[in-house]
């Protein structure tokens, strides 16, 4: 059975609920201004088709009394399209959901819709009502992916392990493949925090299997800032005095011999005061040595920092100064003995 409505002035058809389950088909001719209004449908629902009687992309819609679904033939794209016929960036197009208490929506923002000031005209948005959350879930080991740019290349991925930026397989709660910049007009800081005494938070610098750790230790023995290479402590900064303490345990050393540098090396060193090239001429001067000069006297105290600059470990000079004082003291002791001997023979 079929029913045909032909009226230049429009019209409507009211269908009573069928006694048995059935499907009602509306065929709409393709001319401007045609519209169909569905007041109520139960059982199997309704199917909209084009003038040729065939479903096309976006034209097939079924309703089972509770849910709407877009039904298409195989290999076709299913979807729901919301189009604002008043085209241009001044208009918005969105889909809203409300349960009478809470209201949420998503869509395209227009210039005439200023509720969300952070967005620009043409931006897509998802909005949750006041005090409500937006939840994105990927079950069964899946991930939530974020992409931008031409073709939408992936920029960020959230997995059950953590958030990866620039990587699709984060190994920590947050893993970034690339550079991080903290830029603010205030006082930016990076905080590594733990709870409870005895826990030791740290920052790790790693290249392949080589690691430097900067670790804060908090215990009854003292709260110090340690520097570890691998898992071995190399030095720390005392929390009370700020003194820098380097490792010097005999158990960590080998090939131990007395040094040959002494008083003669001290006499060959040239103590100087100086300014660095990037300091103002009226800045406070520093005391020290010239690395290239010291390298000729105590080579072990100087190292090449880069291909163009040298550095100096002034702590090593302390050992040379100690040796010089010992030599000088031995000379004084010998002079005292000689003087005493001369006095005995006088």
Image (spheres, rainbow, N blue to C red):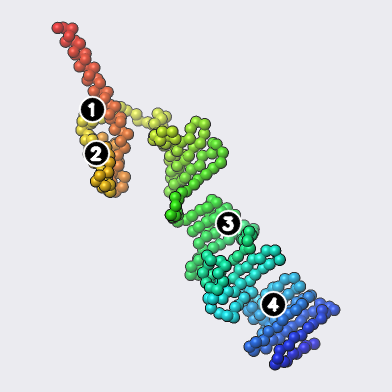
Q: Position of residue 316 (x, y in %)?
A: 31, 33
Q: Quadrant of residue 332?
A: top left
In this view, 120 is above or below 60: above
- Relative side of 14 to 55, left or right: right
- Relative side of 9 to 222, left or right: right
Is 53 in front, or is 260?
53
Kindly identify which residue carries mark 4.
61
- SS type, badge 3: loop
Kindly identify which residue carries mark 3.
159
Q: Which mark is residue 207?
A: none
Q: Are marks 2 and 1 in contact (CB under 8 Å)?
A: no
In this view, 70 is above or below 144: below
- Residue at left offset 54%, top offset 59%: 157
Mark 2 surroundings: few (<14), some (14-19) or many (≥20) residues within 10 A: few
Q: Earlier in the sequence, mark 4 or mark 3?
A: 4
Q: Quadrant of residue 82?
A: bottom right
């Amino acid at each position: 059975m079929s029913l045909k409505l032909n009226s230049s002035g429009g019209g409507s058809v009211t269908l009573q609920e069928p006694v048995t389950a059935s499907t009602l088909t509306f065929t709409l001719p393709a001319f401007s201004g045609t519209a169909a209004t569905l007041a109520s449908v139960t059982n199997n629902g309704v199917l909209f088709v084009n003038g040729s009687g065939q479903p096309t992309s976006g034209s097939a819609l079924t309703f089972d009394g509770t849910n709407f679904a877009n039904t298409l033939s195989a290999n076709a794209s299913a979807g729901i399209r919301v189009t604002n016929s008043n085209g241009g960036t001044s208009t918005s197009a969105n889909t809203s959901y409300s349960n009478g208490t809470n209201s949420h929506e998503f869509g395209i923002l227009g210039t005439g819709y200023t509720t969300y000031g952070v967005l620009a005209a043409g931006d897509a948005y998802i909005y949750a009502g006041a005090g409500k959350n937006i939840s994105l879930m990927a079950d069964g080991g899946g991930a939530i992916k974020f992409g931008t740019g031409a073709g939408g290349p992936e920029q960020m991925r959230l997995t059950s392990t953590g958030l990866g930026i620039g990587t699709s397989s984060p190994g920590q709660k947050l893993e970034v493949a690339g550079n991080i910049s903290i830029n603010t007009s205030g006082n930016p800081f990076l905080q590594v925090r733990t709870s409870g005494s005895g826990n030791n938070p740290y920052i790790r610098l790693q290249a392949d299997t080589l690691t430097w750790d900067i670790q804060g230790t908090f215990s009854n023995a003292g709260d110090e800032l340690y520097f570890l290479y691998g898992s071995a402590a190399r030095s720390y900064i005392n929390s009370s005095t700020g003194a820098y303490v380097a490792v010097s345990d005999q158990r960590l050393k080998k090939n131990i011999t007395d040094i040959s540098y002494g008083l003669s090396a001290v006499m060959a060193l040239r103590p100087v005061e100086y300014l660095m090239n990037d300091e103002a001429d009226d800045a406070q001067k520093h005391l020290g040595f010239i690395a290239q000069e010291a390298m000729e006297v105590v080579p072990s105290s100087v190292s090449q920092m880069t291909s163009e600059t040298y550095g100096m470990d002034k702590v090593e000079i302390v050992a040379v100064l100690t040796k010089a004082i010992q030599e000088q003291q031995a000379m004084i002791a010998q002079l005292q003995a000689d003087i005493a001997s001369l006095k005995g023979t006088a």
